[in-house]
Amino acid sequence: MAKILISFTLNGKKIEDAVSPDQPLLEYVREKGCKSVKRGCETSNCGLCTVLMDEKPILSCTMLAVRADGHDIITLEGKQQEAEEIGLFLAKEGAEQCGFCSPGLIMNIIAMKNELTNPSEDEIREYLSGNLCRCTGYVGQLRAIKAYLASKEDCQ
Amino acid sequence: MNKYVGTGVIKSDAKALTTGKPVYTDDLAPADCLIVKVLRSPHAHALITNINTNIAMKVPGIVCVLTHEDVPQCRFTMAGQTYPEPSPYDRLILDRRVRFVGDAVAIVAGETEQAVDKALKLIKVEYKVLEPVLDMRKAKDNKILVHPEESWKSLCPVGADNMRNLCASGSDSHGDVEGTFAKCDVVIERTYRTKQNQQAMMETFRTYTQLDTYGRLNVISSTQVPFHVRRILSHALDIPKTQIRVIKPRLGGGFGAKQTVVTEVYPAIVTLKTGRPAKIVYSRYESMIASSPRHSMELTVRMGATKDGIIKVIDLYTLSNTGAFGEHGPTTVGLSAHKPIPMYGKQEAFKFTWDVVYTNTLSAGAYRGYGATQGIFAVESTVNELAEILNIDPVKMREINLVREGQVMPAYYGETATSCALDRCVERVKNMIDWDKKAKPITLPNGKIRAVGIAMAMQGSGISNVDVGSVTIRMGDDGDYNMLIGCTDMGTGCDTILAQMAADCLDCDMENIAVYASDTDVSPYDSGSYASATTYVTGMACVKACVELRDKILLTGAEMLNVNVDDVDFDGQKVYVVADPEKFVTRKQVGYKGQCFSNRELAATVSHSSPTSPPPFMAGAAEIELDPETGKVELIDYCAAVDCGTPINPNLARVQTEGGLVQGIGMALYEDVIYDDRGVNYSNSFMQYKIPSRLDINKVRVEFESSYEPSGPFGAKSIGEVVINTPSPAIASAVATACGVRIRELPITAEKIVIGLKNK
């Protein structure tokens, strides 16, 4: 299959590359070393592969790499400071557990914080409903997320 | 006073995990790994009559295609259990007979995924399609045999007989069963069914393999049982165990799924045949159709009681479906009786009979709860039904019957409940959910009905007389420590909690202890992390190893101070003369002494095994809202009180509980593996196999009612498994209270409730 030339930014770095037209963005960014991006299913159910495209959360498993052309893609590798900060709130509850869903969840928490002001518990659940977790049962994560949002509130 | 034990220390791997560092199996696999995939059977039961791989081999990039003609012919089990495994040796890596839809037919390895996918389509297989056995009720003594082969063998006396489709069978009893039934005022008999459930850990099964400098097979795998993987691979590949090294990186969850060697054989045989690194990463689809789910069971409970509600006798028959292969079949079934029955302390007799049958469905395996979950659904539900018949409150029913500390439990191998706060757990949960106020159902203005239900649970802490945990702890540079362990942290936090224990034993900071796990070349032997063993069994090994190392530190310090060892003490920082504390050597000095003109290694390796398996106990209560128009059940609140002995890390214990409860809630309400009449598994993705999402979970509240287990480290028992057991019976009971419909087959769906209401 003929490759297609695309030009986009990945974690702030300008990239020009020839990519296969059938390659999902998920596999592409992992090949580029962004190993935080995980695959947990093939049906867009789990949210593990969440990355930001122009600041909006997307599922990189169901987006072809060619569609990144002209866009700004950010993975958790490009949000290390936020990851560490949010991660600490999760860890204080023991709610990172196996950690496999953490990168996708944290990407979506970052997006939620940018999009919603003072979200209620129901709004948090709704916004993050596409991020599955099998270890925690979600309640510890909710405590952590609320504590994180409250800490940001205090700063403002 | 403990500095770390009993506190919510942050897990030592938290930062790496939450910042997305490449620490899992697939992140670490070399870029030049061959991609390995498996061709799977479309038939539930068939013989391969011809298999042509010539065209597939011609696909550019394909390196090898293996069929049943290319693999060793010695049967083995994929169950990660202590040798000799109770699970029968009934597998080959590839077999001429395929036994379920999804069974392995051929292995393909190539340079790229695209090439492998193409080659998989080009393998031409001819099958002689056979009639399958799909219904577990018809499997025993059926003329169709799942394992007719002569090379099938069972290493342990578990009542297995492949000529009867039996993976295991037997019976066990105590006291005068029929005589006790005859004396009872009321006897009820009920049959319950549980379905296969998927562990559905977020990281699917995966393994990569390569040859090291010495030509040994290195296996890097997402496994709970590295040492068992090594032995099992040696059996499967017919190579010496010394030729295999197994390393476990971070795991993206396990829940028992990774106590079975699901993927390891495939890249391993490719690496042996080609000499090249190879990896397999199961898709979610494969993790749903070719994995190791919970055994589906049919449980018939006969229970006898006095009119005052004293339960005198329980007789349980469990029929368990092990599927196409016998992994964990003989052992899971036992827990269906040994965990629920002993919770009722006033019994005079019990009886347990079981059959574990082969069928042409997905091979079952280990899943958190391991048979106890199924048994507790049946027995706890029967207790709730009995309570209704006797018009006794279900909480009261438990209060008058439950086992108490110090009691002997005949149905639990005659063990004594050396630590038991089950009474306090029930009391606590009763208060948490406000039982007395809510015991009667309430119809809301919108027509929906609110109701509550309760259940109790127990589990074990490791497998008594079997599980081995070992810890190596050694002092090195600056007097700091290295701790090597063979158990497997799968997100549970054992690397951290064992360091908490060691730091308190050695009176140092956790930062002074570097933990490494696990690697069969480096770690001391550990059975692995399953059966709720790690905190209790490996934890005790940790305590014992620290005691032994402390003795060596004292001895070395005393020699350095030129005094008798009885005259010195160690406070964690220095060895000092008790009578003259100004005379001391620092830990750092002792550490470096061990590296200079020393004939004493400042290290200790200790194994620990326990003759008992002290049960953790808990009580759980559900509050639901049921819509009688649609049958929809919404879980409003779930309350749990847990006795895990001393919670070593309360934060991690709490999240274990919350996570286990939510898995149990999924099992209770919607998780189901559904087959069609040809044995095709429809529940093959997260679309069809629904696990709880954030929107499904409202309030889940957890409290601890701690006892102190004298045989456990710092008084600890286990927590990992007991927590999954109460939701099914508690929710089923709440549903029955709300609308009078008893759902005796999981999951408790709206459809079943509506049908029940119509048939009332």
Image (cartoon, coloured by chain):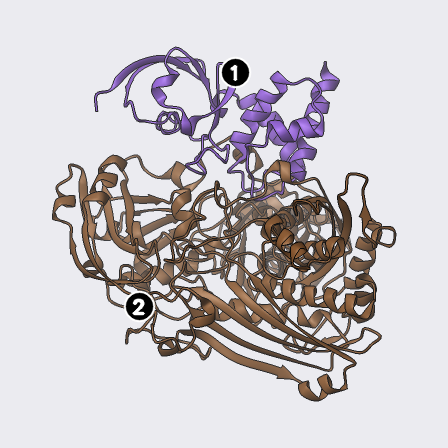
Chain colours: A purple, B brown
In the rendered structure, the answer to whether residue B470 lies left or right of residue B29 reads right
Q: Secondary structure at mark 1?
A: loop
Tell which residue pokes out farthest to the right in this image. Answer: B437
From this viewpoint, is residue B642 visible?
no
Q: Amino acid at mark 1?
A: Glu
What percent of the width, then of the height, locates residue B132? Answer: 34, 65
Q: Which residue is mark 1?
A: A55
Q: Secondary structure at mark 2?
A: loop
In the rendered structure, the answer to whether residue A135 lies left or right of residue B344 reads left
In the rendered structure, the answer to whether residue A71 lies left or right of residue B195 reads left
Q: Which residue is mark 2?
A: B75
Q: Chain of mark 2?
A: B
Depth check: give the residue in front, B521 or B142: B142
Is the residue at mark 1 from the same chain as the one at mark 2? no
What percent of the width, then of the height, locates residue B62? Answer: 18, 41
Residue at 66% over, 47% down: B631
Give residue B210's mark. Answer: none
Depth check: give the residue in front, B196 or A108: B196
On-image quarter of the C terminus of chain A: top right
Depth check: give the residue in front, A148 or A105: A105
* Vertical arrangement, residue B550 with respect to residue B308, above or below: above
On-image quarter of the N terminus of chain A: top left
Residue at 30% over, 34% down: B31
What percent of the width, then of the height, locates residue B147? Answer: 33, 71
Q: Amino acid at mark 2?
A: Arg
Badge 2 crowding class, 10 Å Cα cut-off, few under 14, some 14 to 19, many 20 or more, is some
In the rendered structure, the answer to whether residue B570 lies left or right of residue B270 reads right
What percent of the width, then of the height, locates residue B475? Answer: 55, 50
From this viewpoint, is residue B294 visible?
yes
Q: Chain of mark 1?
A: A
Q: Are marks 1 and 2 in contact (CB under 8 Å)?
A: no
